[in-house]
Image: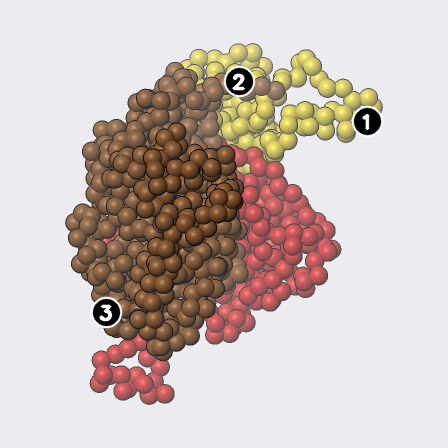
Chain colours: A yellow, B red, C brown
Amino acid sequence: MTRKRLATAWLDGCSGCHMSFLDIDEEIIQLFDRIELVYCPLMDFKTIPENIDFALVEGAVSSQADKEEILSLRESSKVLIAFGDCAVTANVPGMRNQFSVMETLSRAYIENSASNGILPDSVVPKLMKYARPLHEYVRVDLFLPGCPPPAGVILSTLSDLIDGRPPGIEGKTRFGA
Amino acid sequence: MRYPAFLQKIADRADVQPVRVLTFTIDGRMVSAREDETILSVARENGISIPTLCHLDGLSERGACRLCIVEIKGSAKLSPSCVTLPRQDMEVITNSERVMDYRRKILELLFTERNHICSVCVSNGHCDLQALTAELGMTHVHYDYLHTKQVVDASHERFSVDHNRCVLCQRCVRVCDEIEGAHTWDVMGRGHLSKVITDLNQPWGESITCTGCGKCVQVCPTGALSEKGKSVAEMTKKRQFLPYLKLMRGAEIT
Amino acid sequence: MTIEELQEIGKIEKEKQGGFRHRIHVCVAAGCLSSQSGLVKEALEKEVARRGLESWALVKGVGCLGLCTAGPMVAIEPDGSLYQGVKVSDASDILEALGGAPVYRLDCSSHLPFFTRQKKIVLENSGRIDPESIEDYVAERGYEGLYTALRTTTPTGVVDHVTKSGLRGRGGAGFPTGLKWTAVSKAKSNVKFVICNADEGDPGAFMDRSVLESDPHRVLEGMAIAGFAVGANYGFIYVRAEYPLAVKRIRTAIAKAERLGVLGRNIFNTTFNFDVSVRLGAGAFVCGEETALIASIEGRRGSPRPRPPFPSELGLWGYPTLINNVETFANVPPIIRKGGAWFSSMGTEKSKGTKVFALAGRVNNTGLIEAPMGTTLREIVFDIGGGIKDGRKFKAILTGGPSGGCIPAKFLDMSMDYESLAQVGAIMGSGGIIVMDETSCMVDMAKFFIEFCMSESCGKCVPCRVGTVQIYNLMKRITEGNAKPDDIKLLEELCDLVKSTSLCGLGQTAPNPVLSTMHYFMDEYRAHIDYKICPAGTCQMRPAEEST
């Protein structure tokens, strides 16, 4: 049996959803008998591959770089999953939306800086005006709310998808922790 | 209530308290009710769940959150079940595709309005709004977020109000007015600029009418009103006194 | 007071005014006053005094003459001259021309279709009587209707007349007035109230204001008749505070009516008592909704409550309450005086009588008109209204203001009545008609009205409070050229949501302008969305890239 190609991505989020993924513990071994990880922030992939079966995307779209990544992931993926609250609602990254980008940056890099604060002008991707959920940019096939979604739900969702069943997440996860 | 003459004689007797009882159906189930009960309360008595947000047993009804809307056969209009009285042989449908869809959309609108980010909320895990998302199967918000900026008033020594979390259900306003009798809370502004205020929009801590009873905090469905010193997910509301609300209001329940 | 005494007052007044060779009527309603008709009146009075013509010519302030666009207006009786755009400096020429040829440069032909095609019931005294003189009103058979009701009819009889007349609520929804009166009259209560809804809030509508300014006694008489019919002894007029002149006139009228004994205790020597007082609205559109209006009179926040129970059952302070619009009450005195059958002989099968319209927008004759129900839209816009400004092309009209819909050119020959309007997705509303030509952008117009509803939403129910903001944001995006192709679908969905689930009429009708413009002018929406072009050239396209 060919293994399904799984990608996971980490946009503007805390990586907690990825940690929750790892929390499925030893069952990850059996899971990986059936899937092949083709893109993941924890591994060294430089480009987004073609023909992704399932893409788990954590985090909100906050910067131009995030936007490019999500557009490209959408292009390559059959099933794109908004993975966790940041991807579904913009969540904590979205809390900056009521402030201007300048206010947000200066709070982080200047006001709370121990020494002479300076705003980053290279390397760090430029923030867009708002942090937005994935579905404001691309079509999302499945929403997996939760901060983070519980490990069990991640496992069952992936298993369902691999087996071609509609994933039944109703009542198993919700916004927040 | 009036009856035909021969019955009226009996009904007029002081020791007889005539209350008309009627039967109707909810989702095809035959139920019976007193004519002064709302559809919502009859449904709940019969284990049929209808989502609500502004409703709270014991407080006056507002019919404002529109989550408890139901279909009534023969009427094109949707009716809020918390303020609609049943009629004999009425056919109420609480779970049609149409109604469920509207409820979900209304809930989504609430989420776009202010900051309802559960993961960093004091009421995370104990919130009526959060629970509604699961109950109504709302997985995401497909409208634009409005990104409004609200303030936090932490001037009271024991409580704080975070307007970012407020859904304007006015439970606080009603409990303060109808139960505590202080009427510290009210609403100012209109439309999306509405805001609950203490006294005449003075800081809560300086309110001369607030008795500090904290009922508003306990009835608040979200993390908008909370006790100080609570961190994320620590604010559990104490609603044990709710069954007594009706009692406290005496016979004036309308 | 007896009918003879009442008629005597009228007779004396008639004789007094008839004693003058010339009566110079100067419009002193808000429209003309704002173009300084007050000064014109003063100038005319001075000129009369200067020429020593005090016993020959009477200068009289009257209510609205209708053609507001041509104000200040002056009419000379019995000469029949009608002057427009009169200035202070014209006073001398006007007096010079008395009895001879009119001043041609000021002439406004009273043979214009604007005047001849109208049929006046509600406005029959407007522009003819002094709104601050009760005698003038009595001279026009004023308060005879009340006398007829009180002395020769029973309350049920009065309700029957109104039912037979086929009169329907002029506030917007067109609910049969007779039915409403019956409901309140049947309600068992020792205390009942009559409320006159004069919280006219639609942008572009000024029918109620004009009636109150021009003929306030007619409304009081209608209310008193209603009070007698339903068994109420107390009435409130809820006027918006933005109508100071209407408030002043209605207060004057109340005081004078009380002094004459046609309001107050034992009216016309009967046991019927009726008092009226004025309550001012503080500028909330939602207070035109009856339950919000009641809350506002009670001194609470003006927000609506779910109905039922209707005010006829549970109204002001919990008592059965009759709420009608200004124009509805203004129709009542002639109905009682002349009978329900007379009234129902006018209009269409289901819409009886006449309707007052406020013509506004890109039409030549803006102003106040009254036409029988069933008059075609074409007659209103092109005959009475004098056609489109600057020879442009008619595009559509909007009726019912922020709750209404637009009617495109293909329906120009449609009859203006409740049913026909509903059929094309519009409503009669309170009577505001906004005319649009090819330079009006329908999308922009719809955006204006949804913005109005958004800021006037009371904030009580979620769909209206948040939904209108969402709709407005989408409309804004469309008119700025930033919309996505899917936004039309989202717009339709939101409109349906707000319409179907809102608590009161404001929310339930707020999406109407958007829905009806989408229905008739989808190509304009498409042009904005797909090609970032505003065909009418109204919207400023400013495509915005989201930046840091």
For the residues labelled 1 and 3, the Cα–Cα distance comes to 87 Å
Labels 1 and 3 touching (C-beta < 8 A): no
Residue at numbered disc 2: C545
Q: Amino acid at mark 1?
A: Ala
| Spot occupied by residue C125 in the image (x, y as percentages of width and height) | 34, 52
Question: Is label 2 in a helix, a strand or a loop?
Answer: loop
Residue C12 higher or lower than C239, as above or below: below
| Spot occupied by residue A34 in the image (x, y as percentages of width and height) | 43, 24
For the point 50% across and 14% down, which residue is it?
Answer: A48
Residue B82 in sight in this render: no
Q: Give a yes or no on whether discs 1 and 3 share a subunit.
A: no
Q: Which mark is residue A114?
A: 1
**Mark 1 crowdedness (10 Å alpha carbons): few <14, some 14-19, many ≥20:** few
Q: Which mark is residue C157?
A: 3
The residue closer to the viewer here, A73 or A158, is: A73
In the rendered image, which quarter is residue C230 located in?
bottom left
| Spot occupied by residue B75 in the image (x, y as percentages of width and height) | 26, 53
Q: Amino acid at mark 2?
A: Glu
Residue B60 higher or lower than C496, as above or below: below
Q: Chain of mark 2?
A: C
**Mark 2 crowdedness (10 Å alpha carbons): few <14, some 14-19, many ≥20:** few
Question: Is label 3 in a helix, a strand or a loop?
Answer: helix
Point out the frontmost of discs 2 and 1: 2
Labels 3 and 2 touching (C-beta < 8 A): no
Q: Amino acid at mark 3?
A: Gly
Q: Chain of mark 1?
A: A
Question: Is label 1 in a helix, a strand or a loop?
Answer: loop
